[in-house]
């Protein structure tokens, strides 16, 4: 393995380190609490310790990391697409070992982990399976036709897609009741069964989970009233999750319109989540490129990173400034094929995998990059979570800077609450994992503590 530091790119983004690994890598998963990255490789997963950028022993496995769910409570990764009859691989991420395999429907590459009740739902065509994640045993088999499941963590609802039937089954999992069956057949999509949520504005963007025939279109759903509001003529070539992201900071949804042909430039649609109006359209991938491989919103810099495929010329990374809704970096890391973008919200790093045998480590402060030492841990972190219900008590720390206030951030690094010493109400937050970030004196590391909010 070779570590190569690289300089600032266009005064916008710092490619801090290039890690060369001994095998070809594809899709990836990053685990912020454990500070490690799994990268898909032939016959298994490469395990990268991101505190030292050294490889740990490889995990033998045959599954592909583009379909997986992360149970952070039990530190287990469920990886779908396993080619054997037992279609789900269960990985103990703390121990970097395969626990076992689960026999469930191989034809549906989608599941949903609900952290507030520690349960995993797995669509299986004629059945919706409900698993207890503590022992991976089936708790119930619901007689619901299902091809995809999307979790509304604020509304405590599960939206169960019913494939080509053009319906969304809205399930109240806390009361075990069907709230509504929404007719979404007006959305011109192969299987309008998947949702991406704007929790703040109570919207869901609906289209096909994965591409079959396409290109598909996007519907806008009101998740308070559970009604279909609009259909946008945005063409999705490779499914909803690769082409649509929601920016909760500015209340906008970003959608890549792509017809699948390299001869035509791709267009980014910017949609106001509050009014459902199209605010702007701009070219996000030039002619002879497709921007539908992977897209992530980076909350700490308020930018979008997407991979633009260049056909036989490989691919490149595009960076979009969400303050101006314009491309600010049009083609960095240009060369071999890039496959995935993973975010570290705690240490504010961006990992890009691909170009045959590389993991790129990027830093983006939102205005200018800050040089960091790759092998040094810049922040002290307590990985033992604090369980709170209703009120978070914050002790007074003598190391806190007077001018800096601690805050609570979510798993994506977005600030959700300013904190003060003493009692802080968290009743308005959705159940889940958050992090207390405390700015220390200049000669101290920034302290980060995990908090689990429950009902």
Image (cartoon, helix red, strand yellow):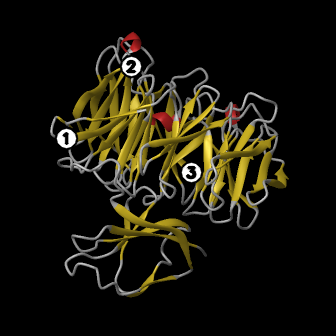
What kind of element bears circle 3? strand
Image coordinates of residue 19 in percent, x first then y, are 39, 34
Of the pair 395 and 60, the residue shown nearer to us: 60
Which residue reaches farthest left?
11
Density class for disc 1 (Cα within 10 Å; few <14, some 14-19, many ≥20) is some
Of labels 3 and 1, the one closer to you: 1
Image coordinates of residue 47 in percent, x first then y, are 54, 41
Density class for disc 3 (Cα within 10 Å; few <14, some 14-19, many ≥20) is some
Image coordinates of residue 336 in percent, x first then y, are 39, 19
Of labels 2 and 1, the one closer to you: 2
Q: In this view, does 73 lie above or below 191?
A: below
In the rendered structure, are the residues bearing label 2 and label 1 in contact, judged by CB atoms less than 8 Å apart? no
Of labels 2 and 3, the one closer to you: 2
In the rendered structure, are the residues bearing label 3 and label 1 in contact, judged by CB atoms less than 8 Å apart? no
Residue 227 badge: 3
Q: Is residue 165 left or right of residue 320?
A: right
Of the pair 37 and 413, the residue shown nearer to us: 37
What kind of element bears circle 1? loop
Q: Is residue 440 left or right of residue 385?
A: left
Q: How far apart are marks 2 and 1 (CA)?
A: 22 Å
Q: In this view, does 239 lie to the left or right of 143?
A: left
Q: In this view, does 320 lie above or below 237?
A: below
Density class for disc 2 (Cα within 10 Å; few <14, some 14-19, many ≥20) is some
Task: Identify the residue at horizontal 61%, vertical 50% (top origin).
Answer: 93
Which residue corresponds to mark 2? 336
Of the pair 187 and 300, the residue shown nearer to us: 300
Which callout, 3 or 1, points at the residue further toward the start of the chain?
1
Residue 12 badge: 1
Q: Distance between the residues labelled 3 and 1?
A: 41 Å
Which callout, 2 or 1, points at the residue further toward the start of the chain?
1
């Amino acid at each position: 393995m070779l570590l190569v530091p690289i300089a600032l790119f266009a005064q916008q983004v710092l490619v801090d380190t290039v890690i060369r690994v001994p095998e070809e890598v594809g899709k990836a998963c990053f685990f912020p609490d454990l500070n490690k990255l799994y990268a898909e490789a032939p016959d298994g997963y490469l395990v990268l310790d991101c505190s030292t950028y050294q490889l740990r022993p490889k995990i033998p496995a045959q599954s592909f990391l583009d379909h997986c769910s992360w149970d952070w409570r039990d530190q287990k990764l469920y990886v779908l697409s396993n080619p054997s009859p037992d279609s789900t691989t269960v990985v103990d991420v703390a121990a970097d070992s395969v626990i076992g395999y689960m026999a469930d429907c191989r034809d549906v590459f989608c599941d949903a982990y609900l952290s507030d009740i520690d349960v995993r739902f797995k669509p299986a065509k004629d059945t919706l399976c409900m698993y207890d994640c503590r022992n991976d045993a089936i708790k119930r088999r619901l007689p619901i036709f299902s091809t995809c499941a999307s979790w509304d963590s604020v509304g405590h609802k599960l939206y169960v897609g019913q494939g080509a039937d053009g319906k969304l089954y809205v399930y109240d999992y806390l009361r075990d009741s069907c709230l509504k069956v929404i007719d979404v057949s007006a959305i011109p999509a192969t299987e309008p069964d998947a949702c991406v949520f704007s929790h703040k504005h109570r919207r869901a963007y609906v289209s096909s989970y994965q591409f079959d025939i396409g290109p598909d279109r996007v519907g806008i759903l009101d998740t308070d009233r559970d009604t279909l509001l609009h259909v946008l003529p945005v063409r999705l070539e490779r499914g909803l999750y690769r082409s649509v992201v929601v920016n909760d900071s500015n209340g906008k949804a970003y959608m890549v319109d792509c017809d699948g042909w390299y001869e035509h430039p791709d267009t980014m649609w910017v949609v106001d989540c509050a009014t459902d109006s199209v605010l702007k359209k701009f070219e996000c991938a030039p002619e002879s490129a497709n921007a539908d491989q992977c897209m992530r919103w980076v909350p700490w810099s308020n930018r979008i990173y997407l991979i633009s495929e260049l056909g036989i010329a490989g691919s490149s990374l595009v960076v979009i400034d969400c303050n101006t809704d314009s491309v600010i970096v049009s083609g960095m890391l240009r060369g071999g094929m890039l496959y995935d973008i993973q975010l570290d919200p705690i240490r504010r790093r961006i990992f890009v995998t691909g170009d045959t045998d590389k993991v790129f480590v990027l830093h983006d402060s939102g205005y200018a990059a800050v040089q960091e030492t790759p092998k040094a841990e810049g922040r002290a972190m307590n990985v033992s979570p604090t369980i709170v219900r209703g009120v978070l008590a914050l002790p007074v720390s003598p190391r806190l800077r007077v001018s800096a206030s601690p805050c609570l951030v979510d798993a994506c690094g977005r600030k959700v609450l300013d904190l003060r010493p003493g009692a802080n109400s968290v009743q308005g937050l959705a159940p889940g994992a958050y992090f207390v970030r405390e700015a220390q004196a200049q000669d101290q590391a920034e302290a980060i503590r995990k908090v689990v909010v429950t009902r």
